[in-house]
């Protein structure tokens, strides 16, 4: 289990992380989402001892990362696949990890097989790796100590569709065996497919957290019409909320109520569905709209 409790980080007068609190539970994949600059990477760096917190605590399996006697045996970390030593081979990097963690040497070959790096590739200098190969090597390094928890920041970067599917199956299998996975990614579809729980951060603060099903179910109803203004007016007149979003209207009314309001106002609907059917993207954009660098046209 990973527990983050009222974690804050300030740089002078700027607050990058503001009293962040959440848990990543064993046997579950927790998706950690937020726009660029929202505080995801800073939070994860604090969790694994790379950045000191201004206040608050973060524990892995009941202890701070700095207090773990052999951290790689308890938590696997991948924050930047490009941060590996460019002059070493993939095999050398894994061998150094194996020796540092004091684990059997055959674990190196096991990990190379697991992440599908061939003998020829493993003996190549990392400077000659593609980003996808560096991601595979980083995942191998995170897993080599057979940890109980994983903290991964954008692990799918550079992977092709087959590689993304492989990574998804790998992480799902890890969680199904009782492992804890905290996963940050800008690929919202991948998070939607694999995650059990979601933590959404914006402007350094948690704006939503809970199970994926609960958060998506709370999104309301999404409807569309040729005249969105008329549809929104009909919904408001019927006592419901209405906000134009992504070419339609999001409302707290259920689909039947939307249909009745539209019929009464003579507004033909072109689309009507629960907002959770729109997927994670709409929920994410709605929750983080105050922290977005780009405006999304309605």
Image: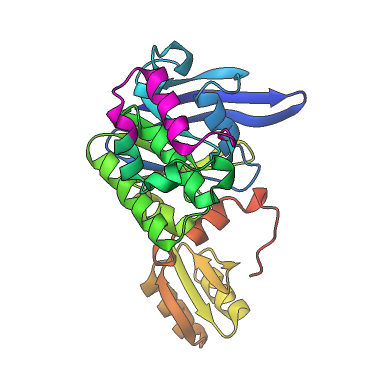
x and y percent of residue 166 in the render?
35, 54
Q: In this view, does 276 lie above or below 151?
A: below
Considering depth in this image, is 32 or 92 the residue closer to the camera?
A: 92
Q: How many marks?
A: 0
Is residue 281 visible in the rendered structure shown here?
Answer: yes
Q: In which quarter of the image is residue 26?
A: top left
Quadrant, the C terminus: bottom right
x and y percent of residue 23 in the render?
40, 31
Which residue is rendered at x = 46% and y = 60% of the image? Answer: 160
Residue 136 appears left or right of 226: left
Considering depth in this image, is 164 or 290 the residue closer to the camera?
A: 164
x and y percent of residue 284 in the render?
52, 54
Q: Quadrant of residue 51?
A: top right
Considering depth in this image, is 65 or 281 the residue closer to the camera?
A: 65
Was residue 104 drawn as part of the magenta stretch in this picture? yes
User: What secondary structure characterizes most of the magenta part?
Assistant: helix
Q: What stretch is highlighted in magenta?
A: 84-108
**Which residue is most to the right?**
13
Which residue is rendered at x = 55% and y = 25% of the image? Answer: 46
Which residue is rendered at x = 31% and y = 44% of the image? Answer: 113
Was residue 114 drawn as part of the magenta stretch in this picture? no
Quadrant, the N terminus: top left
Which residue is rendered at x = 53% and y = 20% of the image? Answer: 49
Residue 23 appears left or right of 242: left
Is residue 3 visible in the rendered structure shown here?
Answer: no
x and y percent of residue 158 in the render?
52, 54
Q: Is residue 211 above or below residue 39?
A: below
Q: Quadrant of residue 63?
A: top left
Q: Which colour scheme is used?
A: rainbow
Q: Is residue 63 above or below residue 78?
A: above
**Which residue is most to the left?**
177
Considering depth in this image, is 119 or 217 the residue closer to the camera?
A: 119
């Amino acid at each position: 289990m990973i527990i983050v409790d009222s974690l804050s980080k300030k740089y002078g007068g700027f607050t990058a992380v503001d009293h962040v609190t959440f848990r990543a539970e064993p046997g579950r994949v927790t998706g950690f989402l937020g726009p660029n600059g929202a505080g995801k990477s800073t939070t994860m760096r604090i969790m694994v001892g790379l950045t000191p917190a201004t206040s608050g605590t973060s524990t892995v399996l009941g202890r701070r990362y700095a207090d773990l006697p052999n951290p790689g045996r308890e938590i696997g970390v991948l924050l930047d696949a490009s941060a590996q030593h460019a002059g070493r081979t993939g095999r050398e990097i894994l061998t150094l990890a194996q020796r540092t963690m004091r684990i059997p040497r055959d674990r190196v070959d096991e990990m190379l097989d697991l992440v599908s790096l061939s003998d020829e590739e493993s003996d190549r200098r990392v400077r000659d790796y593609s980003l996808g190969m560096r991601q595979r090597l980083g995942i191998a390094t995170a897993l080599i100590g057979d940890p109980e928890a994983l903290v991964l920041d954008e692990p799918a970067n550079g992977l092709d569709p087959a590689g993304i599917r492989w990574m998804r199956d790998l992480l799902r299998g890890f969680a199904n065996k009782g492992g804890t996975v905290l996963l940050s990614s800008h690929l919202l579809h991948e998070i939607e497919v694999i995650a059990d729980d979601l933590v959404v951060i914006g402007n350094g603060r948690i704006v939503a957290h809970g199970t994926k099903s609960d958060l998506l179910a709370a999104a309301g109803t999404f409807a569309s019409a040729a005249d969105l203004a008329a549809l929104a007016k009909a919904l408001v007149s019927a006592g419901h909320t209405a906000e134009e979003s992504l070419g339609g209207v999001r409302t707290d009314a259920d689909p039947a109520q939307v249909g009745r309001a539209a019929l009464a106002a003579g507004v033909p609907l072109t689309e009507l569905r629960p907002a959770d059917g729109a997927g994670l993207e709409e929920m994410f954009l709605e929750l983080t709209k105050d922290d977005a660098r780009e405006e999304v046209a309605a």
